[in-house]
Amino acid sequence: MPLSEIGERYIDLMESCILGLIYRDPAQDPWSEAAFDMEKRLRGLDWPLKAHSMIGKARMQNVRAAVEHVLENNVPGDFIETGVWRGGACIFMRALLKAHGVTDRIVWAADSFEGLPAPDPERYGADAGDPHHTFSQLAVTLEEVRENFAVYGLLDDQVRFLKGWFKDTLPACPVERLAILRLDGDMYESTMDALKALFHKVSPGGIVIVDDYGAVAGCRQAVDDFRGANAIASTIRAIDGLGVYWIKS
């Protein structure tokens, strides 16, 4: 059911706040200048100093389209993001459920809440030399993410957190069915761990989103290897040159 005009304005405002488009906080990544760059922020090409998401406008709008697709088509299951940083995409999912009056789905936020793991090149050669674990900017505590949900009034029993390395937490994730699986683990290991543990729980018609497919070679290889090994023929669709998604057949 389409949102009212007030509902549309609420979601638009949430998106702008989560992405830092209103207060225009500067970047903190190694390759950006400190000044706010609107084009980079919209494209998800910087690491904001304060904003709650770094995925940019197109990938955030893809989150909305995915949520609305599964609601309109009655695709059963919860939503999960594996690799949440400050929680922005999960907060947006929860806001969309709130706006649509949905009370029977849970948003799961899975993360180590202490950054990315050091690469294990003996097991995952594609991760050799991966530097993500060296960036302290990517380590956000569970307490901070919970507070980010709370400042929007969205920390409630429809939000659950899974803390720890994916290889340990995701196989035991108590979710039965997923309508949306959003992967944002950057590395081959993190991406493969999430796909192995959770893809079989995605309902037919559900959506798999991969944030880093076009940005990190290891992530892309993990997706391609998993799809090949499991004969997944669903068409991969580009979002913005970085993120992609497919609908599970």
Image: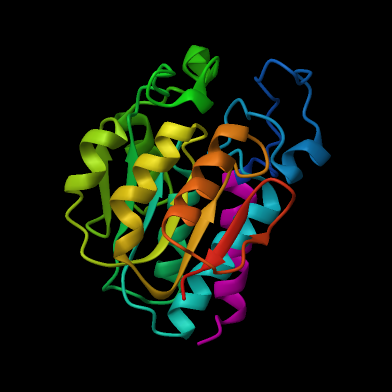
User: Is residue 2 at least partly visible in the picture?
Assistant: yes
Q: Quadrant of residue 48?
A: top right
Q: How is the image coloured?
A: rainbow
Q: Quadrant of residue 216?
A: top right
Counting every numbered tag in the picture gives: 0
Q: Please state if 23 lies on the left or on the right of 246 as rendered.
A: right
Instruction: Residue 101: give x, y in percent of width and height.
Output: 38, 77
- Residue at point 48%, 24% (across, down): 125
Instruction: Residue 221: give x, y in percent of width and height.
Output: 56, 40
Which secondary structure type mostly characterizes the magenta part of the structure? helix
The image shows residue 201, relative to residue 27, as above or below, that is below
Q: Which residues are magenta?
A: 1-18
Q: Please state if 173 lies on the left or on the right of 229 as rendered.
A: left
Q: Quadrant of residue 215?
A: top right
Question: Quick check: is 5 in the magenta stretch?
Answer: yes
- Residue at point 41%, 32% (across, down): 189
Question: Quick check: is 28 in the magenta stretch?
Answer: no
Foreground pick, 126 / 75: 126
Instruction: Residue 102: give x, y in percent of width and height.
Output: 35, 75
User: Is residue 91 at least partly visible in the picture?
Assistant: no
The image shows residue 104, relative to residue 2, as above or below, that is above
Q: Please state if 73 lies on the left or on the right of 174 as rendered.
A: right
Instruction: Residue 50: give x, y in percent of width and height.
Output: 57, 29
Foreground pick, 246 / 114: 246
The image shows residue 39, relative to residue 98, as above or below, that is above
